[in-house]
Amino acid sequence: MPSPFPGMDPWVEAPGVFPDLHSALIIYLREGLNAAMPDGYVATSSHLVWVDPELRREPDVAAFGPPARPASGAEPLEEEFSECGMVAVASAPVAEPHEEPYLEIFSDRGDRLVTVVEVLSLSNKRPGDGGRTSYQQKQGEFRLAGVNLVEIDLLRGGPHTTAVPLRELRHLAGRFDYHVGVTVAGSPTRYFARPIRLEERLPTIRVPLDPGVPLVPLDLQPLLDRAYDTGRYRRLVRYDRPCDPPLAPEQQAWAEGVLRGKGLLT
């Protein structure tokens, strides 16, 4: 079943839903780009990898069970080591690498990176997160390497993260909730942006390739609708609870009206 909202669904921004949506959008964006781009270009998925010592994986106790311990007294290893004067020292947990997918568009049989397409994730917009630091570093690397960068931000929460300068964007666009930013290769200080309000349909954006090659149109709304349907978010999302992050009062009133009209709120 489709989302009740005409554009972005603010309820799917929640931490329990958005990571799954993020993965689905990357797949459908790749499919849409490969169907629309001219011969000589191909979109493939890649991964941003970083290690954050604050994000440590918990052991899967359900699958492996807790480690066996003696019924009483010290562990056998402790007894054996203590006999030779050694003391037990707690070991530090090992931080595991974290990965998030994004898209790369190559030309010349995969030899030359032309464009990168990013869907911003929760970790990209979380202050102090290793994912945000790594993302901003890659952002600069793409710009210096002369690679086009398309950034799709469908998250209202967190600090501004795309390369598009926020002050100028707000001056030109006024209020907006989401946006798409494009940094064109060869013009690292020129940015193009499409601000998006919660109440409107997601737009058809234009993805740059090489100079002289027409921009590639990509309609975002059908991709979001498809991700919503295949993810069965209608069964997962609780529309009777406030969304996370919360809406402004006037937006909350609008959203409740939409949900009532769809029979999802009494």
Image (cartoon, helix red, strand yellow):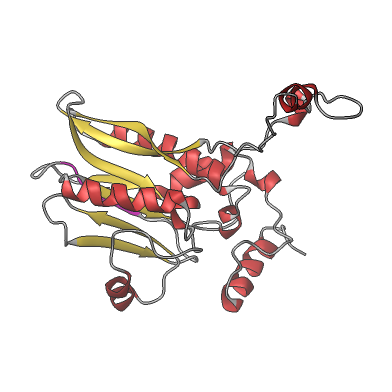
Q: Please name the residue shown 49% across and 44% down the image.
A: 22
Q: Is residue 81 left or right of residue 212?
A: right
Q: Position of residue 218 (x, y in %)?
A: 32, 45
Image position of 266 with respect to 22: above or below: below
Secondary structure mostly seen in magenta is strand
Q: Please name the residue shown 30% across and 57% down the image.
A: 181
The outermost residue toward the left is 212
**Residue 115 lies in quadrant:** top left
Q: Is residue 88 left or right of residue 115?
A: right
Image position of 165 with respect to 204: above or below: below
Q: Quadrant of the C terminus?
A: bottom right
Q: Position of residue 153 (x, y in %)?
A: 41, 56
Q: Is residue 206 found inside the magenta-colored segment of the image?
A: yes
Q: Position of residue 194 (x, y in %)?
A: 32, 62
**Residue 44 lies in quadrant:** top left
Image position of 18 with respect to 263: above or below: above
Whether residue 129 is visible here, answered yes or no, is yes
Q: Quadrant of the N terminus?
A: top right
Q: Is residue 46 left or right of residue 55?
A: left
- 119 or 58: nearer the eye? 58
Q: Position of residue 134 (x, y in %)?
A: 37, 48
Whether residue 150 is visible here, answered yes or no, is no
Question: How many numbered marks appear?
Answer: 0
Q: Please name the residue shown 18% across and 42% down the image.
A: 209
Q: Is residue 219 found inside the magenta-colored segment of the image?
A: no
Q: Magenta residues, as a range?
A: 204-209
